[in-house]
Amino acid sequence: MQELGIDVLDQPLYASGNIATSGGCLSSTYLAAWTICKLASKEDAMAAIHYVAPVGEKEASLDHCMSVISAYI
């Protein structure tokens, strides 16, 4: 991408309006949470992420995910 002159952001998620992009091993989690926030509610997104988070890491996973997407919701 950089060879094509495209800026690559050093961040896990970027969104503008109704378009979002993400990279890395947690990108699907971030995109799912962002999409649920946009189409339903923040509470619904939090419930979904809490449901799929690893046992013993639910609160930490939820807090981290919401901190990543918070600038875009």
Image (cartoon, helix red, strand yellow):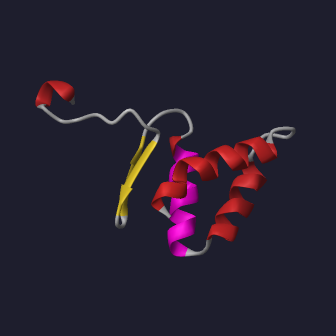
Q: Is residue 72 above or below residue 40?
A: above
Above or below 22: residue 49: below
Q: Looking at the image, which residue sits at the far right?
A: 56
Q: How many marks?
A: 0
Single out the residue that lies furthest toward the top: 3
Q: Main secondary structure of the magenta part?
A: helix
Left of 1 or right of it: where is 54? right
Query: Which residue lies most toward the left here?
Result: 4
Which residue is painted at 44% across and 45% down in the image? 13
Q: Position of residue 71 (x, y in %)?
A: 48, 56
**Residue 29's x, y, as percent?**
58, 48
Q: Which of 15/39 is in front?
A: 15
Q: In which quarter of the view is residue 16 placed?
A: bottom left
Q: Nearer the viewer, residue 43 or 25?
A: 43
Residue sitting at x 73%, y 49%: 52
Kindly identify the residue that appears in the image at 50 percent across and 53 percent down.
Answer: 31
User: Residue 7 location in percent, x, y?
Assistant: 22, 35
* Residues shaded magenta: 28-39
Residue 55 within the segment the image draws in magenta: no
